[in-house]
Image (spheres, rainbow, N blue to C red):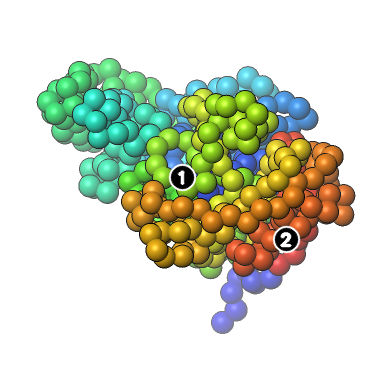
Amino acid sequence: MQQSTSAAARGHNVVVVGTQWGDEGKGKVVDWLTDHAQGVVRFQGGHNAGHTLVIKGVKTALQLIPSGIMRDGVACYIGNGVVVDPSHLLSEIERLEKIGLDVRSRLYVSESCPLILPFHVEVDKAREALRETSGAGKIGTTGKGIGPAYEDKVARRALRVQDLKHPERFAARLRELLELHNFALGGYLKSTPLEFQPIFDQAMKMGEALKPMMADVGYRIHTANRQGANLLFEGAQGTLLDIDHGTYPYVTSSNCVAGNAAAGAGVGPEMLHYILGITKAYTTRVGSGPFPTELPIDQPGTVGHHLSTIGQERGTVTGRARRCGWLDAAALKRSIIINGISGLCITKLDVLDGLKEIKVCVGYKLGDQAVDILPLDADDIVACQPVYETFPGWEGSTAGLTEWDQLPLNARRYLERVQGFIGAPIDMVSTGPDRDHTILLRHPYQGT
């Protein structure tokens, strides 16, 4: 029996994931790749993610809407694995419409997405405040309600996008959920409980605005792919922030790894054809948690200060200064394995321009042991002493280069050593923030 659509007619799909602690430059790469894609899918996280795109010198920050929205005609999907704050989503849509983008006609939001509601935000903030005053130390969340919303999902009590279409059902479930969270807010968390009616009224109003964009996202992207559409699955945060595989408990609340692209979008893993890992030429981290190669960033004249200032290292969502350090190839090796990386894109190579020497962490000393991969236990990571290889820096600028042979010899040697250590090919190098500042060695859509 013949299938109605041949395998040859189906589109080719790419998953883009961060291989560090997020902020690797995924948005720029996704935007660049959407020249070859007809659909872009977000499959996890919420508006705690931030992707900054620079197009013809104009900077645009996205948090929840897929980066493909910046390309005319590209469909954008928010999959069931994403937690959605409807208030933020609508404000982001309005902001993009003000700069002339057509959003509502090509944005599809899964009806199965859990909702982030005002009490999730209050619980998130109150918990962080309590941890700080108790001396337990902050996790470093963005305070946007992401974690509490995922908790409700796992506890099977979440309100979802589809519930917005049913006022009576929504009201009944909201009362029960609000009672639970108000009990925590007014008691243990020593914060102020919230009222039912304002939350309900606002949710119903937003639900009406969202109805035209509600969709069965899994089936839509399955159908589009079988009709020949190339899809791009856009990860948020980074592998080392993954709830299962990251530096727990200093992690986000979702699975950031490539394998979750299937579950978080509602399709099978056979649709994930190529996994592109995004890696900075150095390492950064926002928030708390272990960071073996961290350097001080507040001392002018130091490498850490250079990386922070030249790299303009501030969080897209929070505005917090990012912690900076040398590239940790031993941590990167862990990410390669977890994600099944097909190829890497190295970003921000130009930030290393002008440094006299460049170091790469190739392993650690953990007590009397030599370790060549990031440990699984966060306490062990704290105890790790990085082992470095040192490379000579290069003169001249790599900014904006588009050919491998244009790179200084020492820059090429640096990248080749990293590639050899981690065991995955470098297929792309980003040499600046704009779409065109890219060196292509193997195209994720054309070279597989």
Taking the spot 41% from the left edge, 65% from the top edge, the residue there is 369
Which of the 4 image quadrants contains residue 183? Answer: top left
Residue 372 x/y as whole percent: 50, 64
State the mark number for residue 291: 1
Report, in whole angstroms, how far the alpha carbon at label 1 lies from the one at label 2. 24 Å
Taking the spot 51% from the left edge, 53% from the top edge, the residue there is 386
Q: Specify the amino acid type for callout 2.
A: Glu
State the mark number for residue 409: none
Q: Secondary structure under badge 2?
A: helix
Nearest the viewer among 385 and 316 is: 385
* 30 up-or-down from 405: above or below: above
Quarter of the rendering occupied by the N terminus: bottom right
Nearest the viewer among 271 and 164 is: 271
The answer to which of marks 1 and 2 sits earlier in the sequence is 1
Query: What is the residue that sits farthest to the front in this orientation?
Result: 368
Residue 298 x/y as whole percent: 55, 26
Tag 2 residue? 416
Taking the spot 66% from the left edge, 22% from the top edge, the residue there is 99
